[in-house]
Image (spheres, rainbow, N blue to C red):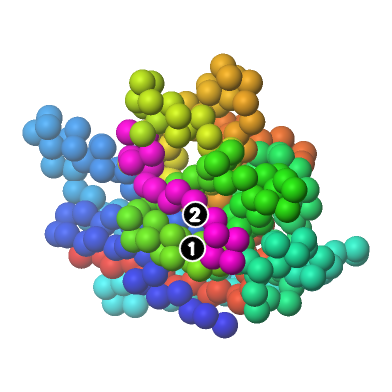
Amino acid sequence: MITSYIQCHLNLLVTSRQVTVQTESERQIDKLRRKEERKHRRGTNNGVEDDLSTVNFSSLLHASPTALPQGTIRKHHKGYEEVIIPPTPTASMKPGERLVEIKELDDFAQTAFHGYKSLNRIQSRIYHTTYNSNENILACAPTGPGKTNIAMIAILHEIKHHFGDGYLHKNQFKIVCVAPMKALAAEVTSTFSHRLSPLNVTMIVTTPEKWDVITRKSSDMSLSMLVKLLIIDEVHLLNDDRGPVIEALVTRTLRQVESTESMIRIVGLSATLPNYLEVAQFLRVNSETGLFFFDSSYRPVPLAQQYIGLVV
């Protein structure tokens, strides 16, 4: 069992008048905090002191419409409150569910999974749609289940369609992976470059802002016209400050598909989010065949969470 401490899952800012809580697993708490901040700013502008110090961690939790999981322990201490959420039990294998063995992949695809014996549960559930169809995909899963391999399977699917006469026609397609940060883009580049090196394939890994600049230039569409697969990592950042850029990229891609009648597959990888149906609709994902949502019970290793709220 892995215990998630404050550094990983809770950003807590405490001042003499304000408590701000942010956590990805509790989006509603974050929304409440932002609402309180707006009220505070309006009050200050009107000459009214809106003392947020009275909003303690307990009230934030009670105000959230998301119920805490069964077995949650709450401890009250002098000056702070502690909430411990136990790990979600691992979901049992369903009838007919099995792990896809790497030897079932095409020979060229097996080289990208060197050292693997099989895909994990989440990857196995998504494998058929990802590798054997052109469906747009939205995969929502908690941190740590191997979403990178889902992207790799989609990449191998695209490569498979450009083999001809025993030769890979690399000049016929481009694959783009959009990562939210430069550091993450560098990590993805290193991982994919190593695993795709036997195929001598190079893909484009970029940030949303960089790809936005490239695709915005209507005078030079030669690169974007070759894109056949667009992978958007951390697509849940649509609800972040950088959301409008990601939204513009998706909209521009969909418009290109409609205007040129070309095929550009979109694969969105996301953390678990409550409005995954709306995100799937935005990405033009068929909710019956291309939408996959996994809660924390599908984590390879159960995760306990610990939150500490301070009141000053």
Decide: few, some or many residues near mark 1? Use Cα within 10 Å; few <14, some 14-19, many ≥20.
some
Farthest residue toward the bottom? 1
| Left or right of residue 111: residue 4 | left
Mark identifier at residue 202? 2
Mark 2: which amino acid? Thr
Q: Position of residue 65 (x, y in %)?
A: 52, 48
**Mark-to-mark CA distance, 1 and 2:** 7 Å
**Residue 306 seen by the camera:** yes
Compared with residue 88, is residue 138 higher up or lower down, i.e. above or below? above
Q: Relative to the observer, which residue lies in front, 47 or 87?
A: 87
- Quarter of the picture containing the C terminus is bottom left
Mark 1: which amino acid? Ser
Q: Disc 1 designates what residue? A: 193
Q: Residue at x 65, y 74 (%)?
A: 114
Compared with residue 149, is residue 223 higher up or lower down, i.e. above or below? above
Q: Relative to the observer, which residue lies in front, 65 or 22?
A: 22
Decide: few, some or many residues near mark 2? Use Cα within 10 Å; few <14, some 14-19, many ≥20.
some
- The quarter holding residue 138 reads top right
Q: Position of residue 214 (x, y in %)?
A: 36, 34
Q: Relative to the observer, which residue lies in front, 82 or 302?
A: 302
Question: Does dot 1 land on a helix, a strand or a loop?
Answer: helix
Whether 200 is among the magenta residues is yes
Mark identifier at residue 220? none
- The quarter holding residue 267 reads top right
Farthest residue toward the top? 259
Q: Given contact means CB atoms under 8 Å apart, are the residues at marks 1 and 2 in contact?
A: yes
Compared with residue 241, is residue 250 higher up or lower down, i.e. above or below? above
- The magenta segment is 197-213
